[in-house]
Image (tube, rainbow, N blue to C red):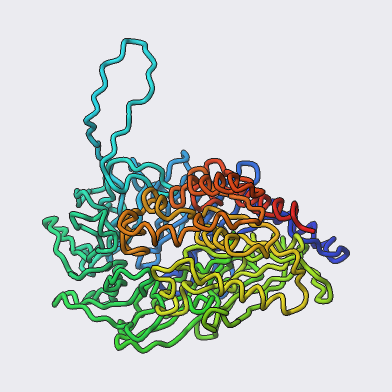
Amino acid sequence: MKTILLRIVLVLFFAHTVSAQVKSNLELLDIFNMEYVSDPQISPDGTQIIYVRNFKDVMTDKNLSNLWIVNFDGTKSRPLTTGNQNDFYPRWSHDGKKIIFKSNMSDGKMKLYLMWMDTKETVPLANTPKSPGQVSWSKDDKQLAFTMFVPKSEKSIVKMPSKPEGAKWNKPPTYITKLNYRGDGQGYFKGGNTQIFTLSIDGGTPRQWTSTDFDHGAPVWSKDSRHLYFSANFNAEEALEPLNSELYKLSLSDGKVATLTDRYGPDSNPVLSPDGTKLAYTGFDDTYQGYQLTKAYVLDIASETSKLISDGFDRDIQNITWANSGKGIYFQFDDKGHTKIAYMNLNGNVNEKVKGLGGLSLGRPYNAAAYTVSKNDRFAYTLGSTEHPADLGTYGKNGTKRLTSLNDDLFAFRNLGKVEELWWDSSYDQRKIQGWVVTPPNFDPSKKYPMILEIHGGPFASYGSVYSAEIQAFAAAGYVVLYTNPRGSSGYGEEFGNLIHHDYPNHDYEDLMSGVDTVINKGYVDESNLFVTGGSGGGVLTAWIVGKTDRFKAAVVAKPVINWQSFVLYADGASFFSKYWFGKKPWEDPESYFKRSPLSYVANVKTPTMLLTGEEDYRTPIAESEQFYAALKLENVESAMVRIPGASHGIANKPSNLIAKIASVLAWFEKYKE
């Protein structure tokens, strides 16, 4: 809250001065002043919206958040919580009189809190040893159901002798027997699993209902509060079958669990219909494709029969919510770089409702958004655009409305680069490819500018028409920036996504180079000053590009895969990557693994190349970067390596890490720019 009050003071100051000043370009420290809305939760009656207001603290280098509330018409915007802490995950009770949320406000420990909306009185519900996961209200608002990790000691066959009294020995050796023993952003797993609990809103001790050796998904209450529905992968070979989950029903009378679905593939995210007779959920029949559309199904609970309702819809279904009529569902989907909300009836007919969602990916321009719906079909959503991070948007009978402008105080005196959507034909097969070109502030088309090609990761993901601090920082430094959705990107249908099936990163190259040529043909790019960078899958493609061409002056390969053989054996998903991205294990088809590895082209590289990765990245571990760095040095290529201490695959877990990444990229490019 101190940070927010400081910003208000700054607004008042700049209101007197900005009119007399020329706007300046964004600076890297401005990242600490950027705020955004997330997780908007509209009240059941549609009159109020609670949202998470995310901000940063420059002194502690932390990402922080408070809860704010505003009327649906935009009046009476005010904080529900304050302080340099993390308050998030607000959820209304069905009667709209209470909310639960998570916070570390009291002692730094993440707890579940209850707030009465009439008095704003707030109490912690339970002092659990671990933070509750996903939480849901019972239909009578008397109980909560949630998941929570329950530790389990894992026995080691390594027996150390007793140390002498007072001796200081190292920690005992870690004995590992599981395939999945570490996770990116989580570190090395401790023994245990997420189990299902219930808790009275009067507080007390949570009751544990499951005690299996498997993780359990978010519990959903039945209408009579006698059962919980959830998703889980209970297969004995669960580690080797990562996408084979089912829906289950847990009886709260006797603790028995019944199976509701039975097919090979993921069944997850169940949502109960208003009348309590059906579950809508997402999934697909697993065919081992690299990219498989997430579809919508409806299960009749009494007969335990399911129906696919989205068979004719060629986009991924996300974030299902039942319409209050019970005759259809609302859902979120990405479509050609734009995130939207649509309504689908139970026959699969689709009616688009809201456009312009986004803004949850502050660093890079990924499509990411959230929304909720009230009983009277009013929507609250994260409103995104290329000009600002997520603000709060609403949709109702009078159309859409923007309720917040969290960054107007900052952008009032900062220039942004202009973003233009582009389409071009790939030189490989003339397929249409989408991208966006960003020009520097105060752009003059008669001049020549250096250009950066910035490539997204995934690879089954998508960039879009949303704000990106990283892209805008590049533009502020005087670069034209091109970011794109080459083949394999989501949001263009299943066929487009699977153009890279067992072939990635081969023909993305032509898609990207054709985009570079399209921008060059506009006449304002200096062809002698082309640069390229990308992270994760974009790092793969950047390393691939410098092995294919020397048209770029310099490259920054961020958190890449360089050698697919080593990657699939120590990334946090060995069974997934080998099964879905290659079809065979590395020793069964070493030629294909190496042929698709950027390492196979290292002898061709002439481009000065920097490697950049977090030291605690377990998705594309830093050893991948180390391999390429050593190989480049052996080939006498100008190269450098930047290691971000304490950072996982999502480098920007601290604001300064995002700044460090951008500063490193720009420093490398400035070194070689003519």
**Rendered location of residue 455, percent (x, y):** 57, 65
Quarter where residue 321 is shown: bottom left
Residue drawn at (54%, 61%), measured in percent from left and top? 544
**Rendered location of residue 555, percent (x, y):** 64, 57
Horizontal side of 474 relative to 275 (left or right) equals: right
Q: Which residue is at the far right?
A: 20
Q: Is residue 88 visible?
A: yes
**Rendered location of residue 674, percent (x, y):** 80, 59
Residue drawn at (56%, 56%), measured in percent from left and top? 54
Q: Which residue is at the far top?
A: 165
Quarter where residue 311 is shown: bottom left
Which of 547 and 24 lies nearest the eye of the viewer? Answer: 547
Which of 353 and 273 lies nearest the eye of the viewer? Answer: 353
**Position above or below: 68 against 417:** above
Horizontal side of 547 relative to 253 (left or right) equals: right
Q: Is residue 376 visible?
A: no
**Rendered location of residue 296, percent (x, y):** 32, 77
Figure disc tally = 0
Residue drawn at (54%, 85%), measured in percent from left and top? 398
Horizontal side of 200 relative to 649 (left or right) equals: left
